[in-house]
Each structure stands twice: as C-alpha cells, then as structure tokens.
Amino acid sequence: MTNIQKACKKCMIISDGDACPVCGEKLSKKWQGYFILMDCTVSIIGERIGYKCDPKVLAAISAATPDEAYAALGVDKARLTAPDDVAREEELRKIRRMLRCSNHCDALVPKLDGLVKRGQIAGSWRYALRVR
Ligand SMILES: [Zn+2]
Ligand SMILES: [Zn+2]
C-alpha cells in the first residue's frame, strides 16, 4: 500500500490521511515543495510564514506540574480520558492547533502525565510551500 501524501490548503500541513489532522479540511494532492519545522523559535522559514507554536504550548512546557500544564493549554484532562471518542478528539485537536514544531512536541508530551501519546498530536512537521 502506498500512502499518497496530501497537504492542507489552510494549515499547509502534509499528511497521508484524507482530512487535515488540525482543521479537518479535505487535503489536496496538488502541492509543491516542503520544509520540516524542527524548532519554531529558530526557523527562518517558519518565522517568515508565521508558523509558531502557540505561547500556551511554551507555558505548558515550563509548567511545574501536569495540572498546570493542562491549565496553561486550556485542555480538559477529564475529557482526554473520557470513553467518549468525540470529546477526546476535540481536546487532542486543540493541542494540535497550538503545536507547530517537532522540538516543542517532544518537550510537551512528557508534561502531559502520560495521557497523550506523541503519535496522537504529532504531525509529520512537514509543511508544503504551495498548495492548490
Ligand atoms: Zn488544516
Ligand atoms: Zn514550536
């Protein structure tokens, strides 16, 4: 099985699903060029295009406890552990929307008390340069 990589017109994120993991838009097969955003605080391309992790992510990374980290993110811990898939997905999507780079994802996951796995919030951190 070959995965066709597609990109989101709005977020520019490259993914192999049909819908954007961040905004839910249908992905396009017509895209060109890409870059990988390792660290949004030092990336020149990221800066130029305006891809920065939300300040809430940075606050959560420097939080002293998991509860403080969740409070900083504005994510409901109880909904993340609920049996309700829809509620869980909504909270995960909130985190995905705030997260833009690989390094901050790696720094954030250990702060979340083991409730969120990297694969649930990590994109490929690859962004298309042009999407039609
Ligand atoms: Zn999107
Ligand atoms: Zn970042």
Image (cartoon, helix red, strand yellow):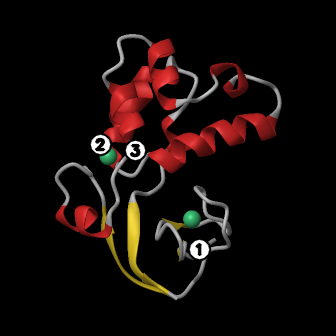
| Residue at x 42% of width, y 21% of height | 111
- Can you tell which of label 3 and label 1 is closer to the viewer? 3
User: Which of pointers 2 and 3 lies earlier in the amino acid sequence?
Assistant: 3
Q: Mark 1 falls on what kind of element?
A: loop
Q: Mark 2 falls on what kind of element?
A: helix
Q: Circle 2: is it few (<14), some (14-19), or many (20+) Cα within 10 Å?
A: some
Residue matched to label 1: 2
Three-letter code for the amino acid on which mark 3 is drawn:
Asp
Q: Mark 3 falls on what kind of element?
A: loop
| Residue at x 72% of width, y 26% of height | 79
| Residue at x 62% of width, y 59% of height | 23
Viewer-proximal residue among 104 and 68: 68
Ligand 2 within 8 Å, label 2 CB:
yes
Three-letter code for the amino acid on which mark 1 is drawn:
Thr
Pinpoint residue 53: horizontal percent, then vertical percent: 36, 47
- Can you tell which of label 2 and label 3 is closer to the viewer? 3
Three-letter code for the amino acid on which mark 2 is drawn:
Asn
Q: Where the N terminus falls, by quadrant?
A: bottom right
Pinpoint residue 128: horizontal percent, then vertical percent: 40, 75
Residue matched to label 3: 54
Say if 33 sits above or below 93 in the image.
Answer: below
Ligand 1 within 8 Å, label 1 CB:
no
User: Which of pointers 2 and 1 lies earlier in the amino acid sequence?
Assistant: 1
